[in-house]
Image (tube, rainbow, N blue to C red):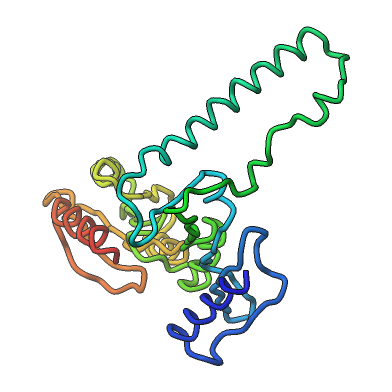
Amino acid sequence: WDRAEGALEGAMNTFAGEGNWKVNPGDGAFYGPKIDIKVMDAMDRVHQCATIQLDFQLPIRFDLRYRKKGSKENVAEDDTEPKQKQKKKKEKGAKQDKQAAIDVEATTSEHETDVDPDPNEPGELPSDFARPVMVHRAMLGSVERMFAVLLEHYGGKWPFWLSPRQALVVPVGNDFIPYAQEVEKRLHAAGFHVGIDDSSNTLKKKVREGQLAQYNYILVVGDKERSNGSVAVRNRNNEQEGEKMVEDVIVEFQELTDTFQ
């Protein structure tokens, strides 16, 4: 354990620098020490993002091993030893189960003392082999925790590729609702999160509500757009990008998604 802590201390000094990290006594896992990466938000709340852990137990349970440097190449007999032990162990367990089924109430000293070894205890390794240490690396920690960090970072203004509200189609009047629905279907079929505001509100109020809902893009459609097969594009900052063909908008949205913007 002390050697593992020393290795982690060396890693932290190398990558973070001495004095830029601290020890949290008693916070290690039962299977080994770990590195927790934490960040603070605007309200000084601590969020744990990632963790790197050293595990000494799972290599034992999985009987993991590696050949030491300079060891013999021919270790066929040693390689078969664990399988033979496992086979004997299964046969032994089957016999015990059969005996228990015949006489459930029998409790002899033989049954009390003849038990399988603890699977957590290290088994004997051939002299040419050593037990490795497993490294757990959890970059996110948990999905919920990562979403909390992203919400804090973006303040609800999600980048397009992550946004649950990528575009809102806004018809200027009831006569253009069918065309707005057609645009919505085309964008949805292309794999984008699209909504439509077919309410009786004024155009100004529809656009404003779309901005408050943090839609990345608002696509306004009227008589001109319906005739041309286009949309009038504006972003959530109310910056107008002009009239664009629907197929061009799909290509632009796909580029934003592919480049994680």
* Residue at 24% across, 62% down: 256
* Residue at 15% across, 60% down: 244
- Depth check, front residue: 157 or 50: 50
Residue 136 in view, yes or no: no
Residue 145 in view, yes or no: yes
Is 63 displayed left or right of 220 in the figure? right
Please identify the residue farthest to the bottom as the structure is shown.
19
What is the quadrant of the C terminus in the image? bottom left
Please identify the residue farthest to the top as the structure is shown.
102
The image shows residue 106 at horizontal and vertical percentages of 87, 15
The image shows residue 221 at horizontal and vertical percentages of 25, 54
* Residue at 57% across, 25% down: 88
- Depth check, front residue: 138 or 220: 138
The image shows residue 38 at horizontal and vertical percentages of 56, 75
* Residue at 69% across, 69% down: 27
Could you say which quadrant of the image residue 30 lies in?
bottom right
Is 34 displayed left or right of 256 in the figure? right
7, above or below 208, in the image: below
Could you say which quadrant of the image residue 164 lies in?
bottom left
What is the quadrant of the N terminus in the image? bottom right
Is 57 displayed left or right of 102 in the figure? left
Please identify the residue farthest to the left as the structure is shown.
228
The image shows residue 233 at horizontal and vertical percentages of 24, 63
49, above or below 104, in the image: below
- Depth check, front residue: 206 or 163: 163
- Depth check, front residue: 24 or 158: 24
Is 154 displayed left or right of 71 in the figure? right
Numbered disc total: 0
